[in-house]
Image (tube, helix red, strand yellow):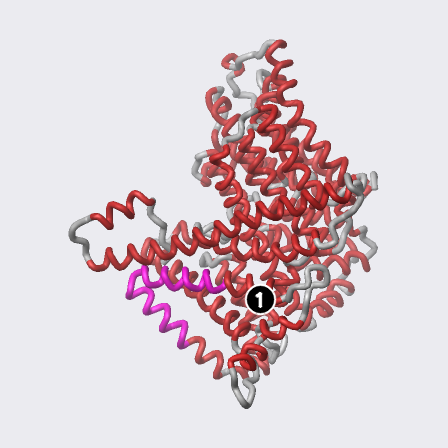
Amino acid sequence: MATVTPPAAAIAIELEAPALPQQLLHRTWTRILERAIGNAAELVGAVVVFAELWILGANVFARYILHNPLVWGDELATSLFIWLTMMGAVGAYRRDQHLRLTALLRRVPPHVRSALETISTVVVAVFCFQLLAALLWPPLIPQRVTLAKFFAATYIGQEMIDFLPALGIPRSFMLLAVVVGLAMMLAMAVLRLIDGRPKTVVSVLVVTIMLAVLAYAGRDVFAALGNLNLLLFFVGFVGVEVAIGVPISFTFGMATLSYLSLSTYVPLSVMAGMMEQATGNMVLLAAPMFVLLGLVMEGTGMARRIVDAISAFVGHRRGGLYLSEVGAMFLVSGISGSKLADMAAVAPVLFPEMARRGYSRGEMSALLATSGAAMELIPPSLLLIIIGAVCNLSIAALFTAGMLPATLASAFLVVVSLRRSRRERVELAQRVNWRRRTRLLIVALPAFILPFLIRFLVVTGVATATEVSTVGVIYTLFVGIALYRDFDWRNAYPILRKTANLTGSILLIVAMANGMSWALTQSGFAGTLTRVLEHAPGGQVTFWALSMLLFIVLGSALEGIPVIVLFGTLLFPIARAAGINEIHFAIAVVLAMSIGLFAPPIGVGFYQSCAFGGVDPDLVVRATLPYIAALMVALLLIIAIPWISIGFL
C-alpha cells in the first residue's frame, strides 16, 4: 500500500515516545528510509535543473552574443537530461505525482483500494527489478568468469566502449542514471510493501509469483498467438493496469517488458536503449525549462499581475470575470507552457471574487477546465513541443498554426459563458477607476511582454524552443527580482524540486511510451494499421473520424503525452499519405486530446480543475457539457477548414 510520509515533527514525536508498539517502530524506519531516498533524488534533480539552466543560458550567450557556440554545451545538457528524468521520476514516485487514473480508486471500499494500491506497488517493483536485471546481468556469461569479464558482458558494460564525441565520456554515464533511478524506485517500492498490510501484501505477492511462473511456462503458447499478443498485452494488460490505478508510465513499461519476455526473443535491455533515446532529444529539453518558467512566473507574481490587469478592465461587466478567466488563461498559457501552472496562477486570483458575485463554483471549474483544453494550442504548449519532437515537425510552424485555432476555441467558450452569466449579481461588482487601471496595466506590462517575446523568437526562427524557454526563465527572474522585488529566495529550492519531479513524471511517460511504440512497430502493427486505414471506406472522412475519436478517448484516459508518443509515429505517416497536411492534423489532434483530457467523467485535467475550484466533480459535470460542446464545434470547424490552422504558414 502506498504510504504518506509524515512530517518531520510527527517522526520526532514517535521516536521520543517511551514505549511504542513493535509494528509502529517497524513502520517508522521504513518511512524514514523512503523519505531519505526521495530527498536524495530530489536534491540531485534540483541541482541538475539548476545546472541545465546555466548550461543552456551559457550556450545562448555564447551563440548569440559572442558568436562562438559551445561545442560541448548541447551534449552536456542532453547527457544530464536523462539524470533529470530519472531523479525526477524517483521524486515524483515518492510524492505520488506520477500520472494515473484514480476514478476507480475513489469509488471502491478502503480494503479494496488498499489491495489495488499494493498491486500497483508490486508492478513498480517487478518492472524496476526486471529492467535492472537486464542491464546488470549478462545474456551470456563468459566461460572463465572474472568480475571484469562479467561486467564487460553486461549491457551497461558494453556501452563503456562508446564515447560521446565532444565530452569524451562513455555513454554508460547516461545509462547509469537509469540504473540508479530504477534501484531507488525499487527500494522505495519494497519499503512500501514492508509498510503495507501483511495479509494483503503476501496475497498479492503469491498471486503475482504464480502468474509469473505460469506465464513463463506458457511461452510457447504466447509465441503461437502471434499478433494476438498485441491485444493481450497492449490493450488488455494496459487497460486493466490503468483502470486499477497503476501509474501510466510503469503500465507502459511493464506491458512492453512482458510482451518482449513472453512472446519474443528480444533482450529486455532494449527498453533501456529506448528510454535513453527518448530523453536524448534536445527539443524535449524545452519541457523542464518551460515547467521551471511557469513556477518562477508564479513565484514572482507575474501571472497574478496579468490577471489583475485584465479583470480591472472587464471584470465589472456582466460576464466580465468569465472573460477575465478565459483571457488570463490565453495570455498565461503563452508563458508557462503548462496547464497546471496556468490554472494554479488564475484560479486563486479570480475564484474568490467570482464566488462573492454569485458565480457557481461548478461553473467556474467547468470554464477553467475547458479553457485549459483550448489553451493547449497556445505556444509554448508542451504538447506542441512533444508532438513536434516525436513526429519530426517544425516547432515554429506548430506555434504559428496553433494561435488562430486557440482564438477560435476561446471565442466559442466566451459566447457560451456570456449566455450562462445572466444570473450574475453585477451590483456587487467593484468598478476600478482609470487611475488604478493604468497603474495595474503599467505594472503588468513586463509580464505582458513575455508571451509575445516567446512567440516572436520561436516563430521567426531566431531561437529554438529550448533556447527561448531558457531566455524566458532568465527574463522572469530579472523582472521578479529587479522590478517586482517579489521573489522569495526560500522558494528557490522548492521550485527546482517541483520542476525536477514534474519533468520526471512527464518524461518517464515519454520514455516508456517510446519503448512501447518501438515494440508495436517491430511487431508489424504499424504496417497492418496503415493498410486497414488506407483501405477503409470513406477515405479522409473516415480517417478523420476514427483518429479524432481515438485521440479524444485515449486523451481522457492516458493524457496527451503518452498518446502522442504511442500513436503519433503511427498515424502521422498515414495522414500524410491520405493528403492531409501534417501541421493541420497535429493541431486537430492536440485539441481532440485536450477535449478528452478535460472532459468528465475520466479526464485527469477535469479533476485537477475541480481541485482548484474546491468543488465535488459530480457537481461540475453538468456545467461542463455546454463548454465541451462548444469545443467540439470548434474542432469540427478546424478539421473542415484547413486554412484556420495553416493559413499563416
Whether residue 408 is visible here, answered yes or no, is no
Number of marks in the image? Answer: 1
Does 329 sit above or below residue 464?
above
- Residue 104 point in image, percent of width and height: 43, 53
**Picture quarter with the N terminus:** bottom left
**Picture quarter with the C terminus:** top right
- The kind of secondary structure the magenta stretch mainly shows is helix
User: What residue did someone put label 1 on?
Assistant: 234
Residue farthest bottom in this picture:
143
- Residue 169 point in image, percent of width and height: 65, 64
**Residue 33: in magenta span:** no
Does 4 sit above or below residue 431?
below
For the residue carrying disc 1, how many other residues have a C-alpha within 10 Å: few (<14), some (14-19), or many (20+)?
A: many
**Numbered range of the magenta stretch:** 182-210
Q: Is residue 212 left or right of residue 583?
A: left
Whether residue 9 is visible here, answered yes or no, is yes
Q: Secondary structure at mark 1?
A: helix
- Residue 415 point in image, percent of width and height: 65, 28
